[in-house]
Image: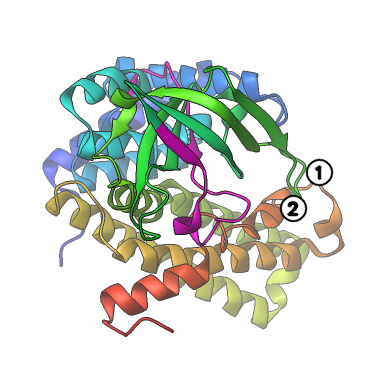
Amino acid sequence: MDLSDTPEEAEFRARLRKWLAEVLPSVGPVPDPADWPARRARDLGWQRTLYDAGYADVHWDASPALRMIFLEESEKAGAPYVGANFVGLLHAGPTIAAEGTDAQRARWLGPILRGEEVWCQGFSEPDAGSDLAALRTRARRDGDDYVVTGSKIWTSHAEVADWCELLVRTDPDAPRHHGISWLALPMDAEGVTVRPLRTLAGSTEFAEVFLDEVRVPAANRVGAENDGWRVTMVTLSFERGTAFVGEVVACRRVLRQLAEAARENGGWEDAALRRRLGRLDAEFRALWRLTQWNVSEATAGGGVPGVGGSVFKLRYSVARQELYDAAADVLGPDALDLDRPWVLDRLSSLSYTIAAGTSQIQRNIVAERMLGLPKGR
């Protein structure tokens, strides 16, 4: 198999590399991690820059090869990632593109691509995290609106979001995986309360969201009423199958930096550490190829990734944790210093086997939908 660039891909890579070299010096510094309004402004500013240069829709409309080149070159150049815009750009937007009406696509996709609106994800609840079908947030139809009452937790970027991809139960008497609907909730609606949550790393990118008789127009429902579980599977396929693409490139960069640090501090003399870093290098190379395959499959399947995303999510979650465990060994006693590189990343990596569907859930998906094994009792 020839994996080298075609002439078109080589031209795109060279043009993108040149553009990044020209524009990145003018990008401002990364704000304080706790200053989410400033981080929102920077992330959306970068998205607008991409839009003006013709690169904003690369996650949606470009070929798999060009998408991979964009992510690879952006990461190598140190360009900002999607940041606060990741829910809108990487799964809410693609879901609306795949499942929304013409009016919904016209209303929401442009502002996402232009860096005008931020989305958050309102899926998990205190008693319905991995068991998402157990969600209890109710939406009662009242004329042209739904009246929503309930709460969500681990809602990414809720405190700076304009919209929320919200799962609600519209038929409380239906079986668990039925009677659910997918709504676009305006975060400034009356009755919405956001309470930030502080993580182990000290950041507040998650929040609790409380919904008290919030009115949401029925026109904001994506998909048919009570068909939200199917629409949700589309969202999750994007979240697991393609949303972590850029992070694989970032992990490969960190791995190279770890090897350099080990050479400088003498850790490279440890044969076990060298083998460990070598195995991780092979692991992330394989994950990159799996990512390419998943993106290609999504393109061939009408833009929606398949269950191969669960294979990627399952292995990537563990590989990321192993990477930052290796970083701790390279750092030695400095691994306890929160101001050192990779230390906070190691803390955040602990969440990856839970976020976007726990590893146990991913194993069930692989077993049932790929291997055809019977469901557990």
Kind of residue at badge 1: Asp
Q: Can residue 301 be seen by looking at this rendering?
A: yes
How far across and down, in percent of the image, does residue 351 sit?
62, 57
**Residue 369, percent across and down?**
28, 73
* Callout 1 touching callout 2 (CB < 8 Å): yes
Residue on which the image places disc 2: 343
In three-dimensional space, the C-alpha distance between marks 1 and 2, rounded to whole angstroms, equals 7 Å
Along the line of sight, the residue nearer the viewer: 14 or 153: 153
Structural crowding at the residue carrying mark 2, measured as other residues with C-alpha within 10 Å and reported as few (<14), some (14–19) or many (≥20): many
* Residue 267 pos. (x, y %): 73, 70
How many residues crowd around disc 1 within 10 Å: few (fewer than 14), some, or many (20 or more)? Answer: few
Tell which of 337 and 257 is nearer to you. 337
Image disc number at residue 339: 1
Q: Quadrant of residue 165?
A: top left
Residue 102, x across and y down, in percent: 16, 24
Q: With respect to residue 143, does 275 lie above or below?
A: below
> Is residue 240 rendered magenta in the image?
no
Nearer to us in this view, 133 or 22: 133
Residue name at image x 21 percent, y 52 percent? 298
11 vs 180, left or right, is left
Amino acid at pointer 2: Val
At 26% from the left and 21% from the top, the residue drawn is 54
Q: Which mark is residue 158?
A: none
Instruction: Give the extent of the magenta segment.
Output: 113-140
